[in-house]
Image: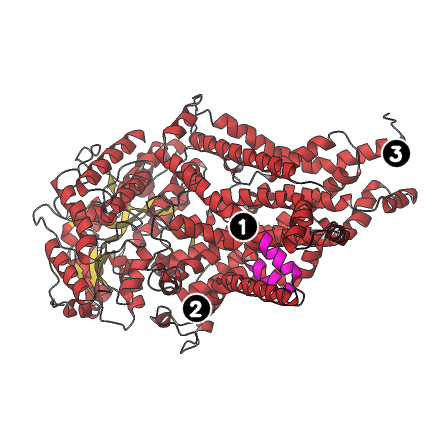
Amino acid sequence: MSARTPQARTEARWGAIFAAPALLLILTILLAPLVVLVALSVTDYRLGAIALRLVGFDNYAAMLADPVLQRSLRNTFLYVAFVLPAAVFGGLGVALLVHARIHTRTVYEVIYFLPVTSTLVAMATVWQFMLHPTLGPVTPLASTLGFGRIDLLNDPDLALGTLALIGIWQLIGFNMVLFLAGLSAIPRELYEAAALDGARHGADRFLRVTWPMLGPTTMFVTVTSTVTAFKVFDTVVVLTRGGPLGSTETLLYILYLEGFQYFRMGYAAAMTVVLLVFLAGLSILQARVIERRVHYA
Amino acid sequence: MRVGRILGGSAAHAVLAAGAVVMLAPFVWMLLTSIRPPEEVFVAVFDPIPSRFAGIENYGQALTESNLPRAMLNGAIVCGGILAVQLLTAIPAAYALARLRFRGRELLFALVLFGLCIPIQVPALPLYIALADLRLLDTYFALMMPFFLTVFGLFLFRQFFRTYPEEILQAARLDGMGEFEIVWRLATPAALPAIAAFSVFSVVAHWNDLYWPLIVVTSAERATPALGILAFRDAETGGNYGALMAAAALITGPMIAGFLLARRAFVRGITMTGVR
Amino acid sequence: MLTRKQLLTGTGAAALAASLPAGRAEAQAPVTLDVVHAYPSFARFFAPIAEEFTKANPNIRIAFRQIMPNYDELHQSLLRGALTHQLPDVAFSGFNRLPELARTLAARNQILDLGPLIAAEGPTWAAENFSPRMLALGKVDGTQFGMPFNASSPIAYYNPELVARAGGNPDAFPDSWDGVIALGSRIKQAVPSAMGVSYYINSFDSDWLWQALVQQGGGRMLAPDGKTVAFGDAAGLAAVRLARRFVTECGMELIGADQNRQQFATGGIGIIFDSPARLAVITGLVGGRFPLRTSPFPITDKQNGGVPTGGNAAVIMARDDTKRRAAWEYVKFSAGPLAQKIAVEMTGYLPTNLRAAGPEFLGSFYEQNPNARAAALQADRSLPWEDYGANGPRIHRAQQEILTSIMRGDITPEAGLARMVEQTTALMRAA
């Protein structure tokens, strides 16, 4: 029954008024650009051109045939595959360990969150120095650890992994904080109930209570980590510019070059649509997978 | 069992401590290098104590021979402007999403969820073209505009407002408070921890942002912190790493200091919204 | 009265020039010029030159934009600016990108022809100040669009101590590439932890060093028609073979450009090749570790070989009359002996102005700074820094990748060269 009481009408009116500015912003900053993007992607627009032509799916076809783009997709997926599990489970692991600390908890929280607050561009210049093959401390350290003479930024086989490690370094504290919040929201009674049910060891308690209760948090962490990993850019700009041998050219970096350096806006728009499809697809996939595996107590 | 607990405890500490060393290493390196004179930056054997304290010259050079002060001022202006608009638009909308029934509520929330997986880089292209046509590139407005919308904020505040006790709201309504008053005089003050947490996220993210400023900024007057450090690094061309590390410390310092100060409020805010 | 349309064409520029009393700008209300250049480290001389200029012309202020990291990014930002109505008044465009820039902007009437302005300075002004070869660097399709400001060609920087340890003569730098490689190889043997030679075309921020390697052997990147790729010939093959030999015989490792300079400065490389503009930076990096020396670039083909002239030229894009007058004064000053003296003293560039070498300007400088002479000694070997058109930056990235593969040994020099020719041709066509 939808009784339109004066109360309900007031609510509805104020609700609409409060939501209006945000809705307007969503329309102009999110939705309208998306429409324009899809439209641009079927044209040959170059920035400043007087006229543009509809080219149907030519841009998308060109993307399939473009080895630079294919490589950037591969690199991006590799990067995400490396960073995502490490950042999510690493963040979870650190959160579990830190959560149990009593005296040192605050100290660890701060230390692990520091990289998140720092300016990645600035810290990347620090990493650049640290990773210098002859003048930085990391290479000799790696030698003494038995890795031999490796050059983490100049070796085409290692550069992407190095960027991934820096990405994890920057992300893990963020996930830790989110998991910590999730952990502190789990009611104690659940653990007591589980103990009564025969759950003795830490692993048991984790699987029966902690992990399921963390479901929504895990989903949020996974989605945001995926998005963050996909949009890797700062480290590429500062450290490698796509080199060596194009091994660190990521999707967003190529998109930046195509759209804002070479001005092939139509092509860049098509690339953005592809990026969007991947992001949306991955997010939906992750949401489904996590929801299915989680039982709400 | 007790032994197990103790061992488990020290193992945990060992792991955490090792991780902490890795987390902190670049900061330590940055600070140590920032006080070294140029001739001692590249040495075969690393001696943490430089023979000459060059901190004053390095930090001095970073402040005077670069665009850093201007970049940091711009950072403050841009972050402040963005945060103001974000709070003004997101708080009421989140309150409405959480507590009021209105037409299109479900749709709006679905849009918010959708927006969570779309980073700024996606709408960047059309926004850039639009700003170029309007001759608004290289302005504060251009730097701030795309971030006025914050789906993260909408999501976070909605989470918080959902847990706000209905009784208080009813009592306020019975007292004759209008919805407008309720939002700003009642709900917002109660949400301060969440607002604090969100503010930290927002300011940090936009202070550190590179992609969008890289695209829209051409003049030195509008440089943001990330652009400032990039320009300084290129200027140095590997000449004086001491000054470069000093610059890095200056750029990233305010964020770290701010976080340390706001830490308690930040943690409470995150916990209260307890992403569930 | 000049109409807007006339202003936008060369006749307008001539009329404008004719209305200027020779050598003096009309003092009007204060004018601020919006200027952009590349390489943040160049602020070292751009800033003092701007100061000197404003002292001499108090009603004209120079405001510099965010400095572009390199010539390619400057070029892209100018092209972007042309389309988004954000062009500066004056820009210092890299020589290799100047033709592309001038052609694009001229088609949209956004760049000023400096010819009439030069003529208006008097019949002997040009000849007194500039050699024809120098002025030619700023000409595009016969029109003088750019005023050469910085000019340089690649030189060798070397560590005489490492050379001596290898049994070489620090005072007689080899003048052939076989000689350079032989020396580098001996350095590597004498000091196994060091690189003998580093020729870092794998990470240099433009194709300047690569063009040098081809041009010194008598080759050219493009045929005279400017449309066909020409480096697939014997000279190009010799160049890629050299590139590989640096790695196999001289112990070269493929690291970043900055890393190379740092390693050289700490005594970890015997010989590097770079721009004389970096003389001041490299000297500072080296400090007192060893007595840095420089030498002209070895040229194999003494008849036709040469080196590409790097550097930049000033172009004027201001639309309005007053700004154009002010811009011309600034550009003229920058190419004048005083400004050139400042630039050369701060860097190691070749002065573009003939009078700058005179005793009251740079005379004693060369006496006291022998390392700065290397660039000047090869002035008559200057060739244009060739450009591939609209897709220049992309072509550079593609070429650099293939060169890196060749140097790594992933692909033979012959196959690599063929691939470079193929990709360059394809990209030129796709522009």
Question: Which stretch appears magenta?
Answer: A92-114
Q: Give me the residue at 11% from left, 60% from top.
A: C174
Compared to residue C248, the image places residue C319 above or below, namely above
Task: Check the residue under mark 1 and report the chain it is in.
Answer: A
Q: Which residue is the site of mark 3?
A: A7
Query: Could you give the CA–CA distance between mark 2 and mark 3, rounded to whole angstroms?
Result: 65 Å
Q: Residue at x 54, y 62 (%)?
A: B15
**How far is disc 3 from disc 1 in space, using C-alphas?**
47 Å
Q: Nearer the viewer, mark 3 or mark 1?
A: 1
- Residue closest to the far bottom: B51
Determine the secondary structure under disc 2: helix
Residue at x-position 16% and y-position 60%: C184
Residue matched to label 2: B33
Q: Are marks 1 and 2 on the same chain?
A: no
**Three-letter amino acid code of the residue under disc 2:** Thr
Q: Amino acid at mark 3?
A: Gln
Q: Residue furthest left?
A: C303
Give me the chain letter of mark 2. B
Q: Element type at marker 1? A: helix
